[in-house]
Image: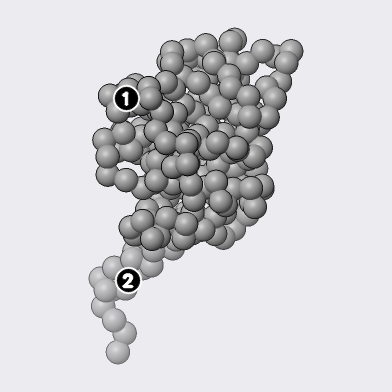
Amino acid sequence: MRPPLRAVAILAAVAAFVTGCSSGDDWSQPHAKPTAVGTLGPGFVDPSARPAPEATITPRPGSWTGVHPSADYRVVLLTAGADAPTKALVAAVEQWAEEEHVDLRTVTPDGPHDLLHAVTRALEMAPDLIVSAGNDLIDPLALVTASHLSQQFLVVGAELAEPTHNVTAVDWSGASFRGEGLGMSSTYDAASFTAERCAAAIRAGVAAVLNDLTGIVIWLDQH
């Protein structure tokens, strides 16, 4: 017996919905290398002198706002911690991804014992960019990033003590955590992680990465 036409229509609609969702979410397929849409404004960097590795630059406030990621930008947000600064950074990254139509996925460790494994899981997803938010991830990242030089990392609200060319950081006086071995900066201020500054951090950091200005620290005391 043939199924009723209504049942056939429902099954077809479900199949179409599932197919549409899976095709848009499939990162196993290659895609074009992401590029910067728009250009950096005056004062982001000195155009006549490219920043040296591990250099710190202080861009002019707002000089990054004209840069956007190209379509289908694949980003993993790697985050650990329930403190207010980390939550503010996560909210900023999520809002940026929504506004820029970024394909964002989130990896969160299952406790302190899972921090290093969480970094590995993010790497296995092979995104265009891994964004790290949370001081607990700094030491695990320091162990892993130098062995995966083809993967771009962006650390917001902290930095690695000795970053390789694939690790870019956005920091400021009230943040600047560089790992347990160095302790917390004397200028650390949780209140400095405002929504405005965190939004500037993700946008300035991504603008730098998309323009191949990597392996540096972007200092945002003014934003």
In the image, which disc is placed on residue 18?
none
Residue at 59 percent across and 48 percent down: it is 145
> Does residue 42 show up?
yes
The residue to which callout 2 is attached is 11
- Height in image: 136 above or below 120? above
Residue 182: image x %, image y %?
47, 36
Residue 16 is drawn in which quadrant? bottom left
Q: Position of residue 54 (x, y in %)?
A: 63, 29
The outermost residue toward the right is: 48
**Residue at position x 29%, y 68% from top?**
10
Residue at image position (58%, 15%) is 44
The C terminus, quarter of image: top left
Residues under labels 2 and 1: Cα distance?
55 Å
Judging depth in this view, the residue of 214 and 19 nearest the camera is 214
- The vertical placement of 118 against 132, above or below, is below
Residue 157 vs 116, above or below: the answer is: above
Question: For the residue marked with disc 1, what is the amino acid?
Answer: Asp
Mark 1 lies on residue: 189
- Identity of the residue furthest to the bottom in this view: 1
Residue found at x 58% / y 22%:
56
> Measured from the top left, where is residue 188 in percent x and y?
36, 26
- Left or right for 53, reference 136: right
Count the labels in the image.
Answer: 2
Q: Callout 2: helix, strand or loop?
A: helix
Q: Residues within 10 Å of mark 1 (few under 14, many from 20)?
A: some
Element type at mark 1:
loop
Q: Is residue 193 left or right of residue 34?
A: left
Q: Nearer the viewer, mark 2 or mark 1?
A: 1
